[in-house]
Image (tube, grey):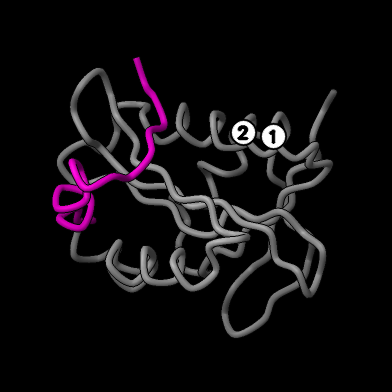
Amino acid sequence: MVELKAITKDNFEDVISLKVSEHQQAFVSSTVHSLAQAYVYRDTAFPFAIYADDTLVGFIMLGFYEEKKQYTLWKFLIDNKYQNHGYGKKALKMGIEYLITTFGAKEIYVGVSSENDIAKQLYSSVGFKQTGLIENNTEEMKYVCQR
């Protein structure tokens, strides 16, 4: 069973130890950097640890981009030891549901590196679509929430 859980003093050290594979490091910020951003933007950043049963497998941070008035998938990673088990897709769906249920999100945006085909495939598999906007080698994708 996959769950999103709060990051607390009890799991903080484990969360900051999460690592992606070497070739993915250019695509995602470290959890330390992400949690620093979450602290600075604490009114609009929503970080969670991803657990499969009782095992920490990843990190997701959702947010609200005030300038554009957009809900976002801000940060997302599954530890390299736990990739390709379906945890990412389940956690992504849970993050989407969190934004819909908690904030009434109608659309959710994500920026993905043009070279990160695996992430683009994952996002597409849950319903994100390319918007056509590309800035600084980052492609924007949008999920339209169904309710």
Q: In the rendered image, which residue does mark 2 sit on? A: 98
Q: Residue at x 33, y 72 (%)?
A: 33
Q: Amino acid at mark 2?
A: Tyr
Q: Secondary structure at mark 1?
A: helix
Q: Residue 82, image x and y in percent?
A: 21, 36
Q: Residue at x 37, y 71 (%)?
A: 36
- Range of the magenta residues? 1-20
Q: In the rendered image, which residue does mark 1 sit on? A: 102
Q: Residue 4, image x and y in percent?
A: 41, 32
Left or right of 109 in this view: 88: left
18 magenta-colored: yes
Left or right of 10 in this view: 114: right
17 magenta-colored: yes
Quarter of the image with the N terminus is top left
Which circle, 1 or 2, is nearer the viewer? 1
Left or right of 122 in this view: 133: right
Q: Residue 68, image x and y in percent?
A: 81, 70
